[in-house]
C-alpha cells in the first residue's frame, strides 16, 4: 500500500465523512485513493474541487455541524483558503477538521517554492510536520486534538511521500465526534461577536476553558439592531417570517445583513464565516449527510465567491438550497453597487435552479417560493429581488 492509499484508509477508519481536495502533487494521489475507496464502497467518487476556499468552506460546514472532515491541498492552495481558515479559527469546530498540505520544497511540481508553515502559524493554526514514518499517526492525532480543542489543525507532509510504501495504518479508532449544538454567539462570525469569538479562540488555543469567557447578550432582530442595519433588516422580515417555517437541518449565513436573522426571535441562520462562505458551508454539510441544508447570501458575497459552490453542487448532484438577497448593493460596507448584469451573468449558468421572488414584501409569495425551493430535487436558488436596495 502507498502512503496515499494509507492516508485515505486512515481517514476512513477515523470516520472522516467529507474529504475535499484541489489537484496538486501529493493531494492528487491521496484524494485519488479516497475517490477509489468511495467508489468501491458507495458506488460513486466525489470530485476534486476547483477552488481551495470552497474546499475549505465545505469541510468546515461539515465539521462544525458534527461530521469529521479533511482538506487536501498544496501550499499555494492553503493560502487561497486562508480567508476561510481565519474565520474557522474564530467559529471553531465540533468534529475534527484537518488540513493536509503536501509540501513541495524544491518547487518541482509548483509555480514557485512556498513554505506555508510560517503563515499558517501566524494565522493561529496549530501545525505539525511529522517524520514520514509518523505521517498516519499524526493525522489521527490532529483529528483528535482538533476535536478536543474545537479548532482546525494543519499537518504538513512532504508531497514526494505519497508514492512510498506506507507504514501500518494506525489501529486506534477515535470515538464518535461530539454532537453539534447550535450556538450563534460562537458560530456566527460578524462584528457583533468578533471580540467574543477571538477571546474564545485564545482560550482554546492556550488550553483554557472557553466557557469561562463571558458571553455577549444576543440582541433581537430587527428591533435591537443598530440604525445602519435595521431598515434593511426590516425589509427582510416577511421573507424570514416565511423562512422560519421551512424545514432546515442547517442554515449557513454570509456576510450580509440577512445573517442577523440568526438572532432571536427568528433563529433562522445557524453558522456564518467568510464572505461567500454560506454556499460552501451548506454544501459541505449536505455532502456529509446533513439535510436539508440552506445558504443565505447577499448579492455581493454571492457574486464575489459564493456562486463557486454552485459548480460543486452541480458536480456532486446535491440539492443545495440558496436564498439570494438581491438588494443591488453591498449594504454592510456602505452600499457599493452590485450591478444587475453581474448577478444575472452568474445566475445564467444556473438558470434552471433559479426561482424568482419578485415581491419579497409579500408574505404569501415568500412562502410559495421557499416551498418550491425546498421541493426541488436539485440545487435551487430563491432570487429575492429588492430593487431599490
Ligand atoms: C474577503 C473579504 N473582502 C471584503 C469583505 C468586506 N465585506 C463585508 S460584507 C461585504 C459586502 C456584502 O454585501 P452583500 O453580500 O451584498 O450583503 P449586504 O451587505 O448587502 O447585506 C464586504 C465587501 C469581507 N468581509 N471579506
Image: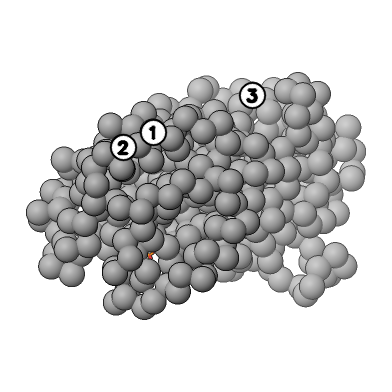
The answer to whether any part of residue 185 appears in the image is no
Residue 331: % across, % down:
30, 70
| Residue occupied by mark 3 | 172
- Classify residue 134 by image quadrant: top right
Residue at (37% x, 45% y) in the render: 271
Which residue occupies the foreground of this view, 232 or 55?
Answer: 232
Q: Is residue 388 left or right of residue 380?
A: left
How far apart are the alpha carbons under marks 2 and 1? 6 Å
How far apart are the alpha carbons under marks 3 and 2? 49 Å
Sequence-wise, which precedes: disc 3 or disc 2? 3
Q: Secondary structure at mark 2?
A: helix
Asked if ligand 1 lies within 8 A of label 1, the reply is no
Which residue occupies the foreground of this view, 1 or 256?
Answer: 256
Q: Is residue 363 left or right of residue 222?
A: right
Neighbor class of circle 2 (other Cα within 10 Å; few <14, some 14-19, many 20+) is many
Q: Secondary structure at mark 3?
A: loop
The answer to whether any part of residue 1 appears in the image is yes
Circle number at residue 371: 1
| Residue occupied by mark 2 | 367
Residue 70: % across, % down:
62, 42
Query: Can you tell me which quadrant of the image ligand 1 is in?
Result: bottom left
Q: Is residue 137 left or right of residue 201?
A: right
Which residue occupies the foreground of this view, 6 or 251?
Answer: 251
Which residue of the protein is positioned furthest toward the left in this rendering? Answer: 223
Mark nearer the viewer, 3 or 2: 2
Mark nearer the viewer, 3 or 1: 1
How far apart are the alpha carbons under marks 3 and 1? 45 Å
Amino acid at each position: 500500500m502507498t502512503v496515499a492509499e494509507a492516508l485515505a484508509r486512515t481517514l476512513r477508519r477515523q470516520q472522516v465523512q467529507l474529504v475535499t481536495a484541489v489537484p496538486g502533487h501529493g493531494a492528487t494521489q491521496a484524494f485519488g485513493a479516497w475517490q477509489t475507496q468511495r467508489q468501491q464502497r458507495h458506488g460513486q467518487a466525489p470530485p476534486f474541487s476547483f477552488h481551495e476556499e470552497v474546499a475549505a468552506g465545505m469541510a468546515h460546514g461539515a465539521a462544525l455541524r458534527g461530521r469529521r472532515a479533511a482538506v487536501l491541498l498544496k501550499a499555494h492552495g492553503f493560502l487561497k483558503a486562508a480567508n476561510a481558515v481565519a474565520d474557522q479559527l474564530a467559529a471553531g469546530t465540533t468534529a475534527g477538521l484537518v488540513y493536509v498540505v503536501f509540501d513541495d520544497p524544491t518547487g518541482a511540481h509548483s509555480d514557485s517554492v512556498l513554505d506555508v508553515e510560517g503563515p499558517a502559524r501566524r494565522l493561529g493554526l496549530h501545525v505539525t510536520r511529522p517524520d514520514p514514518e509518523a505521517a498516519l499517526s499524526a493525522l489521527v492525532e490532529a483529528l483528535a486534538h482538533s476535536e478536543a480543542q474545537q479548532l482546525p489543525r494543519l499537518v504538513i507532509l512532504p508531497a514526494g511521500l505519497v508514492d512510498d510504501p506506507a507504514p501500518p495504518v494506525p489501529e486506534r479508532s477515535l470515538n464518535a465526534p461530539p454532537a453539534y449544538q447550535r450556538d450563534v454567539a460562537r458560530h456566527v462570525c460578524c462584528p457583533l461577536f468578533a471580540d467574543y469569538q477571538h477571546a474564545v479562540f485564545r482560550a482554546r488555543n492556550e488550553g483554557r476553558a472557553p466557557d469561562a469567557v463571558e458571553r455577549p447578550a444576543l440582541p433581537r432582530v430587527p428591533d435591537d439592531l443598530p440604525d445602519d442595519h435595521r431598515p434593511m433588516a426590516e425589509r427582510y422580515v416577511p421573507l424570514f417570517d416565511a423562512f422560519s417555517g421551512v424545514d432546515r437541518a442547517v442554515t449557513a449565513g454570509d456576510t450580509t445583513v440577512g445573517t442577523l436573522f440568526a438572532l432571536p426571535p427568528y433563529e433562522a441562520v445557524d453558522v456564518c464565516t467568510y464572505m461567500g462562505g454560506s454556499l460552501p458551508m451548506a454544501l459541505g454539510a449536505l455532502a456529509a449527510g446533513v439535510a436539508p441544508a440552506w445558504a443565505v447570501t447577499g448579492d455581493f458575497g454571492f457574486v464575489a465567491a459564493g456562486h463557486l459552490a454552485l459548480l460543486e453542487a452541480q458536480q456532486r448532484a446535491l440539492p443545495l438550497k440558496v436564498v439570494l438577497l438581491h438588494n443591488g448593493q453591498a449594504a454592510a460596507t456602505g452600499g457599493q453597487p452590485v450591478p444587475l448584469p453581474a448577478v444575472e451573468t452568474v445566475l445564467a449558468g444556473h438558470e434552471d435552479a433559479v426561482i424568482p421572488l419578485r415581491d419579497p414584501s409579500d408574505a404569501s409569495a415568500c412562502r410559495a417560493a421557499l416551498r418550491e425551493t425546498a421541493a426541488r430535487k436539485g440545487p435551487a436558488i430563491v432570487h429575492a429581488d429588492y430593487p431599490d436596495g
